[in-house]
Image (spheres, rainbow, N blue to C red):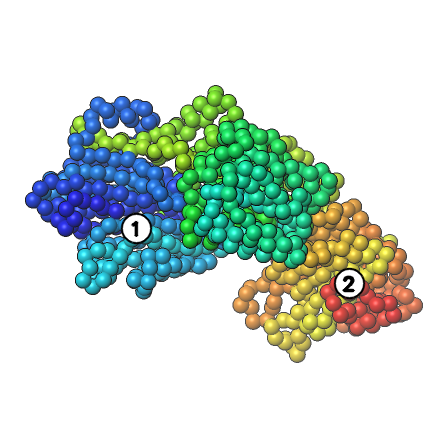
Amino acid sequence: QLQVEDDDKIGLYSYKVQSTITSRLANTMIQAKMVNNAKRSQHIVFDVQVPKGAFIDNFTMDVNGITFTSKIREKSEARKMYSQAKARGKAAGIVRSNTLDMENFKTEVNVPPGMRIQFELHYHEMIRRKLSSYEHVISVKPGRLAKHMEVDVRIIEPQGLRYVHVPNSLGNHFDGITTISKGEKKAHISFKPTMAQQRKCPTCSATAVDGNFVVQYDVNRETTGGELEIFNGYFIHFFAPENLDPLPKNILFVIDVSGSMWGLKMKQTIEAMKAILSELRAADQFSVIDFNHNVRCWRDNLVSATPAQVEDAKKYIQAIHPNGGTNINEALLRATFILNEAQNLGMLDPNSVSMIVLVSDGDPTVGELKLTTIQKNVKQSIKDEFSLFCLGIGFDVDYDFLQRIATDNRGMAQRIFGNQETSAQMKNFYNQVSTPLLRKIQFNYPQESVSDVTQSSFHNYFGGSEIVVAGKVDTENLQHLESIVTATAANAELVMETLRDVEELDGFMKKDKYADPEFTKKLWAYLTVNQMLAERNTAPTAALKRNITKSILQMSLDHHIVTPFTAMLIENADKDEIMLADQPKDPRRGCCPGQCLRLTPNAPNNNKGIPAWANVTAVPVSYMPEQRSPPVSSLSINRVDNDPHFIIHLPKSQRNICFNINSEPGKILNLISDPGTGVVVNGQLIGAKKTENKKLNTYFGKIGFYFKNKGLKVEITTETITLKDGSYSIMLTWSDTGHIIRKQLLLSVKKESNVTITVGEEMSFMVLLHRVWKNHPVNVDFLGIYIPPENQFSPAAHGLIGQFASEPEVYIHHQRPGQAPEKPQATMEVKGNKLTVTRGLQKDYRTDRVLGTDVQCWFVHNSGKGFIDGHYKDYLVPHLYSFLKKP
């Protein structure tokens, strides 16, 4: 906003906002150019709203050809320099604003008649993902009509843009003025209203441009293990897996019903709570506590979120009448007691996430009043795995305290207005934490190649959000950076691997003239400083606090940013006029935004198949076997690959017997059906794109495994790998490398290559992916399956492969020349049948996935007739998980 004494005489001839987002790092510049057309000096104020948590990094001002530039200094040093050379008729400051997520940067200048002045402010911030979208908010409040007005936003996202959307946040007045051009990885948004379009009405002199310009977007995500972006000696790891089942939650709502909540605040709270309760899932448990000077519970313990209980809780909330004082201490201790007791009694699902949500509009007036004591009490009574989320309504609440107590207990706080919007804001906040997908997430990197890594272990991951980890990486001596993320999902332990070439981004970044080459460094600094501010907030001793302050100060000076411990000095070239801008100290405002970060030391680990630096605590060592693919020399394996070619290895007679089965697409063949161990393996056929030589080749396009005793099913297609346990399922794609562990079954995916399923020590299976050229006229992607003969099936095992678990006697004699000299024939006696067999070669693709390795075998004609029991059609089953019906 540009304010002046004599409004009409100041010309705003240009108001420009330029913002560039490079991989979630937004650099924004706001520039205003004015001229004083009055006959006397005028007082001009340049007042800009900057998002809370953004770092102001530069400000310049040009008054009639005299340029003022800025530098960052430690606060007290800056004040000293300022007092020695105060600028005449000029002032600057960063002021707390009365809006939700903004602060104001304000400069006042006295401008002589006829003079021109230009202001330019630069700031940067990391855009966090909320509710499945990144939202970039720019405050556009020029305060008057501008001859040239422009908001220009560029987005550069190497991961690729899923969508870009610009909501109509400045009002319907500006319908159709914004243009968006979107490419695969870049977008450009431009808003350039003419002077006529800016006017509130055709004859008005006031501007209609007054509000926030908002851009929303999301990026593509290939892998569950996240995306590593490496550039200029830093790495950024973005982690936002989707398609996971929600973890059940235990949630206690603690609602302030003191007298100050009376009226609109309570009405809006009741409305929001009713909507929130309706969204609880069947697996969730909950209760409601309301407090004034007393504490009341709707239920003294957690109850299941059945429709009847939810209805009852809504009636209880509807009947609340606010009055009396505020006893926050007692209310929070009651909530932690209910959760602790439920845990001690074994009533909490070990896989669930427990949380307390506090809604309050003021400071304590009853019971314990000292905020530090309340903070200490809650920290002592809450268990390590519970989280506390705080919603502060209005401006009478000590938001700083709510933020401290939330970050101290693995949660976050949000301030919301006590107005018509309250209900929507409360629901919005709840939706951010309503879908926990993972718990105990740990990011691991090779210690010898990375340093200064930001927080790498996280309590929970909520659907729609994103976890970001950054660090320095030794790109000189490293070609690839590997990361391993371990986490607990709703029905399994996950171990996700990601590998990236450290130079992968170089070409892309050099080609784009708008991309910020410093984006990795700035993101790392942004996360590090915010982490230190949060740690300083909860530091137990004064000495520790001093040390953290020192580190923050050093980082602020190194990276040229305004933080609570630095100030910006704005001075002319002669250094005889100085202005000072620093952050306000305000008891009613959280000084330091940023999520709470806790670092856990990495314990050494000796899991097989996973590097020692990956701190895989979730995986018992006993069942992380090495990938048991037998050495090729021993080629003793039963398998089906290519156009269902079966190769059966008979270990006793050391022979390989082959046969083909040609059935039609869609049919499901049983490979193993073992009622004794409860294991089923079936394969579903797909056809080639068209016939060749009057024959349509078929392949396995889907393979199903059913482990009845564990209640687990695995479905593998050429696109995805899914583990199902009852109503839970967890999915990886072929672009992932990772492990899922569930009930002593290990599912290991090797990117674009193979899947190994290992069940305890007893059995293992390998499925190979064959990718063909996408536009091939005939061929399709397909799967091959390899089953080691060491697998311990029961004597009852049957199926096209299972029947050979107990090896039949085979006698081969009368070898004689065949029709082709390289394919001799012989007579094979097996299962009471005499068959003519042909000597030939078949392919084993386990070590060479393109060309395969040749394997000698005796080929049985007519779909294995005489070698397999009965006819191949006897092995067709109705479903992917069906056992074979005994003939």
Residue 475 visible in this rendered orientation of the protein: no
Q: Nearer the viewer, residue 168 or 450?
A: 168
Position of 739 relative to 381 (above/below): below
Marks 1/2: CA–CA distance = 66 Å
Marker disc for residue 671:
2
Q: Nearer the viewer, residue 169 or 603?
A: 169
Residue 684 visible in this rendered orientation of the protein: yes
Q: Place residue 796 in its image quadrant.
A: bottom right
Amino acid type at image mark 1: Val
Residue drawn at point x = 71 percent, y = 44 percent:
347
Q: Place residue 797 in its image quadrant.
A: bottom right
**Dot 1 or dot 2, earlier in sequence:** 1
Residue drawn at point x = 80 percent, y = 64 percent:
883
Q: Place residue 367 in its image quadrant.
A: top right
Residue 585 falls left or right of residue 484: left
Residue 526 falls left or right of residue 673: left
Residue drawn at point x = 40 percent, y = 36 percent:
588
Q: Which residue is mark 1?
A: 140
Position of 432 relative to 549 (above/below): below
Residue 874: x and y, percent?
82, 71
Residue 88: x and y, percent?
16, 31
Residue 537: x and y, percent?
47, 30
Q: Nearer the viewer, residue 612 or 111?
A: 111
User: Given this view, does label 1 or label 2 mark the residue nearer the observer?
Assistant: 1
